[in-house]
Image (spheres, rainbow, N blue to C red):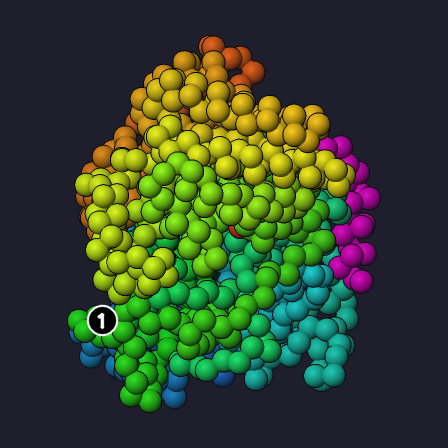
C-alpha cells in the first residue's frame, strides 16, 4: 500500500497528503514530541473508497508488535473537515492483556469496550442504541455479532482496513461533499489519512489528555485556555467539562499549572515554538503518559472574523509574519462581519422566536421563503430575510442575496449556519418554537400567530433571536486593529477603491472605511424625499419650459446643499456625481389611490393626472427616455444640477473646504450625446464663474452602460476626462436580461451550467469583460491619461476586481460597506503579484519574544 512515514525529510505535501500531515511534519521539524505517524495520500484514499484491497502488513510493521494506532483525516485545507478520528485500533484480548500491565486491568478493558462501541457505530454503521455506555465487553461483542452476523474482528489489519475504508467512503459521500463544497472546497477535493501510534494518556503516574491554545477564539487577545482530564485520551478533556480541570491557576480550583508545573512550563515553551515555527496561533492536542508529554495534533485555532484579524495583526507586529502575509490571512468577505451593525441593547424588542446564534450581526427585512424570492427581492432593491425549515445547497444563491437567515431546524454546524458564517450574514438556526410551512408560505409562532411573506422581522444573530418589526441597530465597533490592518491594505493596494453613496450619511460611512472618494452619487435618489417629490412632480407636469425652470429653481438649493455636504465630508477627495438617470414615470404613482392623492395635492383633475401618467408610460422604460436622452430633450434638469454642483463648489471654497467635483453623464451611446451635454455644462460653469468671480475646477466624464458606448469608447474619450463602466446595466444589455426578473430562473441556469455564475454577482469576463477590455483599449488609444473605472456591484467582488486590475483600471467603486473588502482584495492581488516579502529577522530573538508574550 502507498504510505509515507512522516519524518523531517519525508516528501509530505499538503496537496497530496493534506494540511494535517504537513502540520505534523512541521511539528517534527521543530523537535516536538510527536508519536510515530504514517500518511496515506489522496490517491490511496480514493482507491480505498472505490473498493481496492491493500496489504497493510508493511504499514503495521512500522508500529511494531501488537500495534495500537489511531486514524485521523487530513484534508488539503483543515477548514474542509473530514470524518471523525478513530482511536485504539488494534485493541483485542492480547493487547488488553499487554496494556493492563501498564495501565491496570480496568483501564485497559475500558479502552477495549470503547473501541468496540466506536467501531460498531462509526465503522460498521450500527445503531448507537444497541451499544449503550453501561454495556460490558461481553454484551458489546454479542450485540455486534447479532447485528453483523459475524464475530467482532480481532486482527489489527482487518480493523485498520475497515476503518480506513469507512473513512474514505464517508469523505466521498454526498453529504460530506456538499458540506465541504459549502466551505469552498471543490467537489473532487482529496482526503489523506494519518495512522498514528496511540499515546494513551493513561498510566500509573500522572497521565491524561488535554488541549491548549494561547489566544481567545472570539477576540484574538493573548489568553491561555484549555482543559486537561486525568486518565483520558483524545478530546475527552473538552467533551467531559464537568470532570476536566483548567490549565491555569484561577478561582475555579485545581489546575494543571499547580498540579504539574514542569509540564505546564513545557506546554508554554512548545506553544511558543509552535506559534513561531508554524507562524500561526494553534490549538494543541497533547497527552501525558506517566509524566511524558506527547503532541498528538495541532490545529489552527477556530476563530471568528474579528479574532482572525487581530491574530494576523499581532503576528505581524511580533515579527512572526510579514505584513504582506498578514493581509493574506483575512478573506475579503470576512470583513463584513466586522462592519455589520448590531441590535441596540437599549432598544425595545419583542422576541418572536429564539434559536441558536449561528452567525453574528443584525439585519432587518421582509420575510421570503425561497431562494428565488430572495433573489427577486434583492434585484428589486428590497431587504429580505430568508426563512426556511432548513436550508440546502439549493438555497445558497438565495442566502447570497438575503440579509439574514432564520431556520426552524439545524445546529451550529448545520448547512445554514456554515454558509451564513461564510457569507458574514446574521443567522439564527434551530428556532424550534416556530413552524415553517413552505407550502402555505407562513411561519406559525409559538403563540399561534401567523406571519407571512412580506412581514418585517429583525434578526439578532449574536443573541439568536428573531424580533418583531424593524429594531434599532448600532454601527459596527471598529478598533485600532482594524485601522492598522486596513492601513497595510491601503499601502499594498495598487488600484483605488471609491464608494457609491447617495447621501451625507453614506458618505460618512465611506470616509470612515477609507474610501478614496465617491465613485458614483446617484442624484435621483435625492428626489424621493417627500418635500422634494412634490416639487419634482410639479416639474414633470409643467407644460412650458418656464414652468419647468420655475419648479427646478425650487429644487436647486436642495441639490446645492446635498452636494455641499458631500464635498464637506470627502474634503479634497473626488466626488463623482451622476446626472439624473431614471425615466420620469418613476416619480409618478401607479395605483389609483396614488393618482387621486397626487391630483388632490396638485389641485388637478384625476383625468389630467392619468393623462400625464399615460403619456410618460413606455413599453420598456429602462431602454426609453432616461439618462442622457432626458438631458438632451429636457435640458433644464441637467442645467439645474450642473449649477447646483458649481455653486456648491464655490461655497465650499469660500469656507475653506476643498471640493473636487466630477460630473458623469449616464447611458451614453454616441459621441454626439456627449458633445451636446458637454457644451451645456461648460456654459453653466462659465456662468457661475462670472456670477461668483471664483475660479474652480471640475472633471466631466461618461458612464458607459451600453455595448455601443463600450465599442465606441475611443470616440467618447475625446470629450471625457474619465470613463466609468456601469457594469449593472452593461450586463443587462449585453445579456438581454432584466436584473429585476432574472432571479426567477437564474438558480436553474447556474445549476445546469447554462451560466457558470450569476453574471450580476460575478463579472462575465468572456462577454461583458471583453467589452470592458475593448473599451479600455480604445479609450486609451485616443486619450492616454484618461481615468477608467467600474461602478457596478461587481466592484465589490474579488474576482471582478482582479479582472479590472488586469485591465489597468484606476479604481473600482462599490457600496460603502464593501469598501474594506474591496480594498483588501486589491491589496491581496498586489501582494500575490510581487510575492510575499522575505523579511530578515532573528530567529532566536523572535522565539524568545514569543515565549515572553505567552507567559504574560
Measuring 66% from the left and 54% from the top, which residue is drawn there?
310
Q: Could you say where residue 273 lies in the image, as x and y percent from the top left? A: 70, 51
| Residue 833 lies in the magenta stretch | yes
Give the residue at mark 1.
Answer: 441
Asked whether 700 or 41 is in front, the reply is 700
Please state the horizontal and vertical placement of residue 811, each as a whole percent of the image.
Answer: 54, 31
- Residue shown at 69% from the left, 52% from the top: 481
The reply to whether residue 566 is visible in this rendering is no
Q: Is residue 580 magenta?
A: no
Left or right placement of residue 686 versus residue 587 in this view: right
The local secondary structure at tag 1 comes to loop
Residue drawn at x 80%, y 43% is 844
Query: Relative to residue 634, is residue 243 depicted above or below?
Result: below
Of residue 607 and residue 737, the one placed in the foreground of this image is 607
Residues rendered magenta in the picture: 827-856
The residue sitting at the top extreme is: 781
User: Residue at 26% of width from left, 58% of height from top?
Assistant: 605
Q: Is residue 674 above or below residue 846?
A: above
Residue 749: x and y in percent read 21, 44
Q: Quadrant of the N terminus?
A: top left
Where's residue 333, x and y in %? Answer: 49, 49
Quadrant of residue 226 in the image? Answer: bottom right
Tell me if 87 is positioned left or right of 734 in this view: right
Dominant secondary structure of the residues highlighted in magenta in the image: helix
The quadrant in which residue 413 appears is bottom left
Q: Is 320 left or right of 136, judged from the image as shown? A: right
**Observer-nearest of 705 and 306:** 705
Q: Residues within 10 Å of mark 1 (few under 14, many from 20)?
A: some
228 relative position to 163: left or right: right
Look at the image and tell me in which quarter the C terminus lies. bottom right
257 vs 115, nearest the viewer: 257
Please determine whether, in this image, residue 805 is positioned above or below residue 265: above
Amino acid at each position: 500500500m502507498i504510505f509515507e512515514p512522516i519524518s523531517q525529510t519525508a516528501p509530505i505535501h499538503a496537496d497530496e497528503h493534506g494540511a494535517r500531515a504537513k502540520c505534523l511534519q512541521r511539528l517534527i521539524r521543530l523537535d516536538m514530541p510527536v508519536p510515530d505517524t504514517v500518511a496515506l495520500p489522496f490517491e490511496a484514499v480514493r482507491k480505498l473508497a472505490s473498493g481496492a484491497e491493500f496489504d497493510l502488513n508493511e504499514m503495521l510493521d512500522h508500529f511494531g508488535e501488537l500495534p495500537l494506532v489511531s486514524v485521523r483525516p487530513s484534508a488539503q485545507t483543515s477548514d474542509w473537515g473530514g470524518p471523525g478520528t478513530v482511536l485504539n485500533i488494534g485493541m483485542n484480548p492480547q493487547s488488553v492483556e499487554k496494556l493492563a500491565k501498564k495501565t491496570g486491568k480496568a483501564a485497559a478493558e475500558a479502552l477495549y469496550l470503547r473501541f468496540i462501541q466506536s467501531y460498531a457505530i462509526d465503522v460498521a454503521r450500527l445503531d448507537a442504541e444497541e451499544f449503550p455506555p453501561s454495556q460490558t465487553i461481553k454484551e458489546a461483542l454479542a450485540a455486534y455479532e447479532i447485528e453483523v452476523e459475524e464475530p467482532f474482528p480481532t486482527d489489527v489489519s482487518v480493523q485498520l482496513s475497515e476503518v480506513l475504508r469507512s473513512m474514505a467512503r464517508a469523505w466521498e459521500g454526498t453529504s460530506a461533499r456538499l458540506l465541504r463544497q459549502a466551505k469552498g472546497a471543490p467537489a473532487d477535493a482529496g482526503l489523506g489519512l494519518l495512522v498514528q501510534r496511540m499515546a494513551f494518556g493513561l498510566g500509573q503516574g500522572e497521565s491524561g489528555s488535554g488541549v491548549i491554545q494561547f489566544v481567545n477564539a472570539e477576540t484574538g487577545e493573548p489568553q491561555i485556555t484549555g482543559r486537561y482530564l486525568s486518565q483520558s485520551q483524545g478530546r475527552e478533556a473538552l467533551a467531559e467539562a464537568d470532570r476536566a480541570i483548567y490549565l491555569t491557576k484561577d478561582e475555579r480550583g485545581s489546575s494543571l499549572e499547580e498540579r504539574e508545573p514542569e509540564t505546564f512550563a513545557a506546554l508554554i515553551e512548545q506553544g511558543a515554538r509552535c506559534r513561531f515555527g508554524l507562524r500561526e496561533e494553534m490549538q494543541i492536542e497533547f497527552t501525558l503518559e506517566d509524566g511524558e508529554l506527547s503532541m498528538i495534533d495541532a490545529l489552527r485555532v477556530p476563530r471568528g472574523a474579528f479574532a482572525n484579524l487581530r491574530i494576523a495583526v499581532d503576528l505581524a507586529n511580533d515579527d512572526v509574519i510579514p505584513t504582506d502575509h498578514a493581509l493574506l490571512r483575512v478573506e475579503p468577505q470576512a470583513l463584513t462581519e466586522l462592519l455589520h451593525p448590531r441590535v441596540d441593547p437599549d432598544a425595545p424588542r419583542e422576541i418572536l422566536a429564539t434559536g441558536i446564534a449561528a452567525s453574528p450581526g443584525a439585519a432587518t427585512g421582509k420575510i421570503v421563503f425561497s431562494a428565488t424570492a430572495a433573489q427577486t427581492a434583492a434585484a428589486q432593491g428590497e431587504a429580505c430575510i430568508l426563512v426556511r425549515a432548513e436550508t440546502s445547497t439549493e438555497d445558497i444563491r438565495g442566502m447570497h442575496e438575503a440579509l439574514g437567515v432564520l431556520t426552524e431546524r439545524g445546529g451550529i454546524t448545520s448547512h445554514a449556519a456554515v454558509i451564513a458564517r461564510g457569507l458574514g450574514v446574521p443567522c439564527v438556526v434551530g428556532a424550534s418554537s416556530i413552524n415553517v410551512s413552505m407550502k402555505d408560505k407562513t411561519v406559525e409562532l409559538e403563540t399561534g400567530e401567523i406571519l407571512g411573506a412580506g412581514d418585517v422581522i429583525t434578526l439578532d444573530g449574536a443573541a439568536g433571536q428573531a424580533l418583531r418589526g424593524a429594531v434599532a441597530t448600532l454601527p459596527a465597533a471598529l478598533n485600532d486593529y482594524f485601522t492598522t490592518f486596513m492601513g497595510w491594505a491601503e499601502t499594498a493596494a495598487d488600484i483605488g477603491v471609491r464608494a457609491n453613496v447617495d447621501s451625507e450619511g453614506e458618505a460618512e460611512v465611506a470616509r470612515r472605511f477609507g474610501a478614496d472618494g465617491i465613485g458614483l452619487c446617484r442624484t435621483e435618489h435625492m428626489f424621493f424625499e417627500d418635500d422634494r417629490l412634490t416639487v419634482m412632480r410639479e416639474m414633470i407636469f409643467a407644460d412650458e419650459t418656464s414652468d419647468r425652470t420655475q419648479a427646478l429653481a425650487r429644487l436647486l438649493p436642495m441639490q446645492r446643499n446635498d452636494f455641499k455636504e458631500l464635498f464637506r465630508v470627502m474634503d479634497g477627495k473626488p466626488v463623482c456625481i451622476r446626472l439624473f438617470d431614471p425615466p420620469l414615470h418613476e416619480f409618478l404613482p401607479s395605483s389609483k389611490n396614488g393618482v387621486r392623492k397626487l391630483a388632490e395635492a396638485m389641485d388637478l383633475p384625476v383625468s389630467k393626472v392619468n393623462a400625464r401618467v399615460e403619456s410618460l408610460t413606455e413599453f420598456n422604460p429602462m431602454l426609453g427616455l432616461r439618462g442622457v436622452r432626458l438631458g438632451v430633450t429636457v435640458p433644464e434638469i441637467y442645467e439645474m444640477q450642473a449649477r447646483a454642483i458649481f455653486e456648491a463648489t464655490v461655497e465650499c471654497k469660500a469656507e475653506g473646504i476643498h471640493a473636487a467635483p466630477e460630473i458623469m453623464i449616464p447611458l451614453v451611446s454616441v459621441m454626439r450625446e456627449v458633445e451636446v451635454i458637454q457644451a451645456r455644462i461648460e456654459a453653466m460653469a462659465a456662468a457661475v464663474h462670472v456670477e461668483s468671480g471664483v475660479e474652480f475646477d471640475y472633471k466631466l466624464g461618461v458612464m458607459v452602460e451600453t455595448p455601443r458606448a463600450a465599442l465606441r469608447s475611443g470616440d467618447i474619450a475625446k470629450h471625457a476626462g474619465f470613463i466609468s463602466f456601469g457594469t449593472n446595466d452593461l450586463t443587462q444589455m449585453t445579456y438581454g436580461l432584466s436584473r429585476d426578473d432574472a432571479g426567477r430562473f437564474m438558480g436553474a441556469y447556474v445549476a445546469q451550467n447554462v451560466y457558470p455564475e450569476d453574471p450580476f454577482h460575478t463579472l462575465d469576463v468572456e462577454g461583458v469583460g471583453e467589452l470592458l477590455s475593448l473599451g479600455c483599449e480604445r479609450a486609451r488609444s485616443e486619450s492616454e491619461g484618461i481615468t477608467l473605472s467600474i461602478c457596478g456591484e461587481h466592484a465589490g467582488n474579488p474576482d471582478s476586481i482582479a479582472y479590472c486590475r488586469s485591465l489597468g483600471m484606476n479604481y473600482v467603486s462599490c457600496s460603502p460597506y464593501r469598501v474594506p473588502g474591496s480594498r483588501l482584495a486589491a491589496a491581496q492581488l498586489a501582494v500575490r503579484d510581487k510575492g510575499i516579502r522575505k523579511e530578515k529577522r532573528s530567529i532566536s530573538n523572535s522565539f524568545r519574544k514569543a515565549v515572553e508574550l505567552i507567559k504574560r
